[in-house]
Image: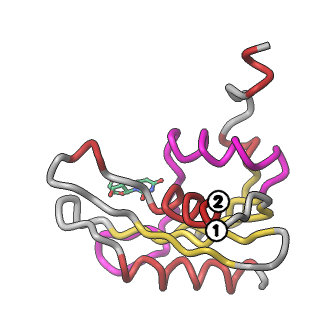
Amino acid sequence: MDHKMLFDEAVKAAEKSYSKYSGFSVGASLLTSEGKVFNGCNIENASYSLTNCAERTAVFKAVSEGYTNFTAIAVAGSGNGDFSKPCFPCGACLQVLSEFCGDDFVIILSDGEYRLSDFLPKRFCEESME
Ligand code: THU
């Protein structure tokens, strides 16, 4: 699965977005070390703060199926069907990703590839509590 293909999967995953309140569709495709892909979309709620982002949907699906090692995630977001503008992962999703992924984990957006450390150079983690 190359990175362009993973981004295309994320665009496809956005079709499942449940985003009747924001009108903003997001899809995320998470690649495991074993080469398996888990797709997620944003799932909104009438009680707005209960919304789950696409990235966290993908992570929770994977972890609940026994997969905890990841190499990359592609994220695609759009309010009008045009996915060319980068959809940067929110802080909550970065924190959830950081539980399972190291600094080198790749984040694929419409404008190129980033590392988790580009967005989250310092992190709260298990060692923070020692
Ligand atoms: N959203 C995501 O799914 N991922 C992000 O990283 C940023 C925001 C969703 C949440 C909400 O459903 C919509 O985009 C607008 O904030």
- Residue located 29% across and 46% down the image: 50
| Residue 127 vertical placement versus 31 (above, below) | above
SS at circle 1: loop
Question: Could you tell me residue 62's position as x and y percent?
Answer: 63, 66
SS at circle 2: helix
Kind of residue sitting beneath label 1: Glu
| Closer to us: 27 or 87 | 27
- Residue located 68% across and 86% down the image: 5
Question: Could you tell me residue 63's position as x and y percent?
Answer: 64, 59
The region drawn magenta spans: 77-105
Residue placed under numbered mark 1 in the picture: 65
**Residues at marks 2 and 1 touching, judged by CB atoms closer than 8 Å:** yes
Q: Residues within 10 Å of mark 1 (few under 14, many from 20)?
A: few
Kind of residue sitting beneath label 2: Val
Describe residue 9's horizontal placement relative to residue 27 as left or right. Answer: right
Residue placed under numbered mark 2 in the picture: 63
Is residue 111 among the parts visible in the rendering? no
C-alpha gap between disc 2 and disc 1: 5 Å
